[in-house]
Image: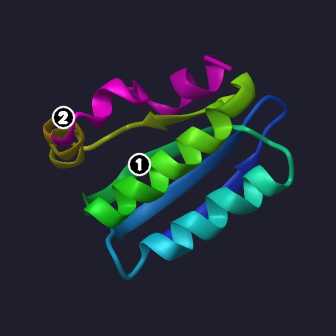
Amino acid sequence: MEITLQQFKRCDVVRVKGRVDSMTAPQLAQALHGIIEEGRFRIVVDMSGVEFVSSAGLRVLLEAQKTCKRWNRGEVVLAALSPTVREAFELTGFTRLFTIYDDVLSAVGAF
């Protein structure tokens, strides 16, 4: 899995490529927590390159979402989910927990 971080004025974009499973989820957690620890709570996760998300990956995203939404600081939004990944989010009920955009530009523009 590859993770690329990009900081903008209003939010941070985390681009993820590959599989997010129990082996790679700690890398994603580290990247998200690094942004949060720096006091930035508006995060866009670009999932256009993600082929698969396991329960471990979903847990990492949910933990980051809870931290960002605490005390109304910000939120984690998702962008460009593939049909397979979107189906995983729908089956687990996570589509209600995250704002999902069709592309990164729309997600960044929402902040």
Q: Amino acid at mark 2?
A: Glu
What residue do we see at 48% from left, 59% from top?
16
Residue 75 position within the rendered picture, expressed as x and y whole percent measured from the top left = 61, 31
Residue 48 x, y percent position in the rendering: 38, 48
Tell me the residue at 35%/67% (across/down). Answer: 20
Quadrant of res 82: top left
Dot 2 crowding, Cα within 10 Å, few <14, some 14–19, many 20+: few
Image quarter in which the C terminus is found: top right
Q: Residue under label 1, please give it.
A: 47
Look at label 1 and name its amino acid: Met
Left or right: where 18 falls relative to 5: left
Estimate the x, y position of residue 39 in percent, counting from the top left.
85, 45
Q: Secondary structure at mark 2?
A: helix
Q: Is residue 82 left or right of residue 47?
A: left
Q: Residue at x 85, y 32 (%)?
A: 9
The Cα–Cα distance between marks 1 and 2, rounded to whole angstroms, is 15 Å
* Horizontal relation, residue 44 to residue 16: left or right: right
Q: Quadrant of residue 22?
A: bottom left
Which region shows up in magenta? 92-111
Q: Position of residue 11 (x, y in %)?
A: 73, 35
